[in-house]
Image: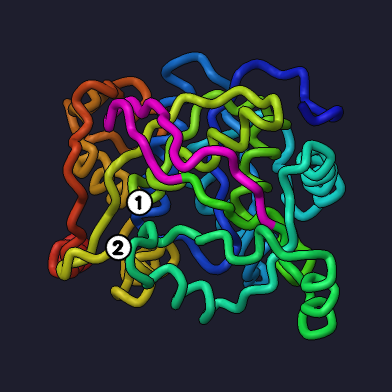
Amino acid sequence: MDSQTLSSPSAGRYAPSPSGDLHLGNLRTALFAWLFARSEGHDFVMRVEDLDRVQEGAAQRQLDDLASLGTDWDGEVLVQSTRIPQHMDAVQKLRDAGMVYECFCTRKEIQQAASAPHAAPGAYPGTCRHLTDAERQERRQVRPPALRLAADTAEFTVYDRFAGDYTGAVDDFVLVRNDGKPAYNLAVVVDDGFQNVQQVVRGDDLLFSAPRQAYLATLLGIDIPEYVHVPLALNTEGKRLAKRDGAVTLAQLRAGGVSTAQVMRMIAASMPLAPWRGEGGPHLPETAQQMLEVFNPDTISREPWTVIPTDLESICCG
């Protein structure tokens, strides 16, 4: 376990990447994570995962948007890039156990190997796992290596509140990229352990990654969290909602005349949540606190939310 582990209560979390503004699907998932944590007695922590692509100012805009919806979090926001020494300590622990090796494969080589007959879909086939010292030395002259986990299992089973027992492939995934930065699967596990995250609520497109992360957690002596993978927001083509799908960020919707309360009612209807009963009669929740008062995890839809542009236009202009 990380020697700097926080002595905090169990926590849920939201961990956006500051690559741009959050869209409706991101905001909905963040609200789900907050609602699960707050309704079940967990702290709620926020983490900015800035080890990859970063757009200047995006992190603060994301935090401002989340706060404007009424979500709050415990403690200071954790910026992932400040914890690179702890990520590398975890890699050293695995290296000391003989579970790390250098990989010199290009992305094209990995794709070609993964598409070969009998290869597990998307799994790294272990091309560099058994290189000799001389072969590694030769390859270092051509390109810097990434560091991969020498996994001792091909699959791992996790429990998800909605999906049940889920068994997924575990390959020799990357721990440190060839630019020297910690890879996502390593950093997320180490930082969840540091923040005592015992509940991970996120989009169900990430369910496939849970077995890898849970397996790595066991190697590092970190508790495996409870997983809750919730349905995504999709566009009308059935693809994951993205900013290219029109006015789908909070700033864009507000610029078009849509109030925060209207956005919240729309998200509440998609979950769906029961009407909130307050002054003026029952209506769909318009704040995170109102959502919390009527939140029932047993009634959440298991189907994705299709965001229809004409519905957004009717809210704005109808």
- Which image quarter holds the C terminus? bottom left
Q: Which residue is mark 2?
A: 240
Which is closer to the viewer, label 2 or label 1?
1
Q: Quadrant of residue 67?
A: top right
Q: Is residue 152 magenta?
A: yes
Q: CB atoms at circles 2 and 1 under 8 Å apart?
A: yes
Picture coordinates of residue 314 (x, y %)? 14, 64
Q: Quadrant of residue 283?
A: top left
Q: Is residue 193 magenta?
A: no
Does the image show residue 69?
no
Q: Earlier in the sequence, mark 2 or mark 1?
A: 1
The residue drawn where x is 46% and y is 72% is 113
Main SS, magenta residues: strand
In this view, 309 is above or below 73 = below
In this view, 18 is above or below 139 = above
Q: Is residue 212 left or right of residue 139?
A: left
In this view, 217 is above or below 68 = above
- Which image quarter holds the N terminus? top right
The residue drawn where x is 27% and y is 54% is 233
Q: Residue 205: which numbered mark, if any?
A: 1
Query: Which stretch is magenta?
Result: 148-169
Question: Which three-letter amino acid code belongs to the residue tagged 1?
Answer: Asp
In this view, 133 is above or below 33 = below
